[in-house]
Image: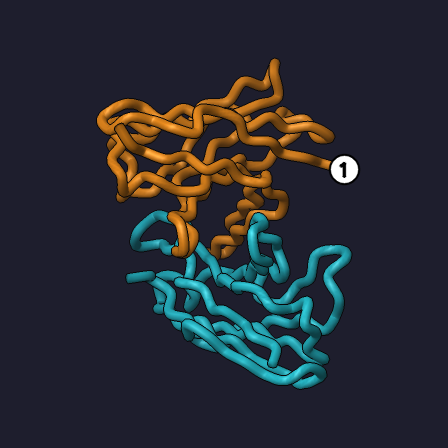
Chain colours: A cyan, B orange
Amino acid sequence: QSVLTQPPSVSAAPGQKVTISCSGSSSNIGNNYVSWYQQLPGTAPKLLIYDNNKRPSGIPDRFSGSRSGTSATLGITGLQTGDEADYYCGTWDSSLSAVVFGGGTKLTVL
Amino acid sequence: QMQLQESGPGLVKPSETLSLTCAVSGYSISSGYYWGWIRQPPGKGLEWIGSIYRGGSTYYNPSLKSRVTISVDTSKNEFSLKLASVTAADTAVYYCARHSRYYGSGTYYDNFDYWGQGTLVTVSS
């Protein structure tokens, strides 16, 4: 059971928009910054979003992040088949003194 | 361009110690940042194992702390993981990564911005 809760799967059609939620508590998302990772099949995770809503160089602006209270959201617009992947949220948990990740969300582009 | 590369045995016997090394190229570990290990059991999610700073200070996942040792060798520009008393539950792909970590105004900023390709370690007799 992960400390951060994500939906196991989401799906949408090419060109559409999808959001992936990450729910936590005051000891993690509520007081610390969130990052998001994309893991394409058979590859290592890749940083998509850091500090709640910042994109590393090279990440298209189709990807966005936000945080409200004890939840965070990853948004992806203009969906492409190449976006099919597992997506993970992560942050520091001040009570556990550990980096924690969500259980991951599998995105299917229909 | 920075690259990280894990190396070590792909098969470890139960009760023995898993040992992995991460070689960093394109960036000097001595320049800063934390350096971390993350694992992913087959078909499951990510689990942070621990991280080390260039000077040797460490953070470990409390659930693994009693069995984990992470060390750094700045002269070789690499850092290492040892996980003792392994069982089948430790079978996973092990990733090394650069860990950006900051603290300010009561808030932690953590992310892993560069990752190795990962190495599968199977625990089996």
Which residue is under mark 1? B1
The correct choice, above or below, for B12 with respect to A76 in the image is: above
Q: Is residue B62 left or right of residue B122?
A: left
Give the quarter of the image for residue A83: bottom right
In percent of the image, x 38 and y 65: which residue is there? A4
In percent of the image, x 56 and y 75: which residue is there? A108
**Which is nearer the eye, A105 or B35?**
A105
The correct choice, above or below, for A76 with respect to B36 in the image is: below
Q: Residue furthest top?
A: B75
Q: Is residue B65 left or right of residue B27?
A: left
Inspect the image, locate mark 1, and give the three-letter code of the amino acid beneath it: Gln
> Helix, strand, or loop for circle 1?
loop
From the top left corner, tell me how far across and down residue B69 is, in percent: 36, 26
Chain of the residue on which disc 1 is drawn: B
From the top left corner, tell me how far across and down residue B55 is, in percent: 51, 24
The correct choice, above or below, for B65 with respect to A10 in the image is: above
**Which is nearer the eye, B88 or B115?**
B88
**Residue A66 in view of the camera:** no
Quadrant of the rendering where the N terminus of chain A is positioned: bottom left
In percent of the image, x 42 and y 57: which residue is there? A101
From the top left corner, tell me how far across and down residue B11 is, in percent: 38, 28
Q: Is residue A36 left or right of residue B44?
A: right
The correct choice, above or below, for B26 with respect to A8 in the image is: above
Give the quarter of the image for residue B83: top left
In percent of the image, x 50 and y 78: which residue is there? A10
Mark 1 is surrounded, within 10 Å at the Cα level, by few (under 14), some (14 to 19) or many (20 or more) other residues, namely few
From the top left corner, tell me how far across and down residue B26 is, in percent: 73, 30
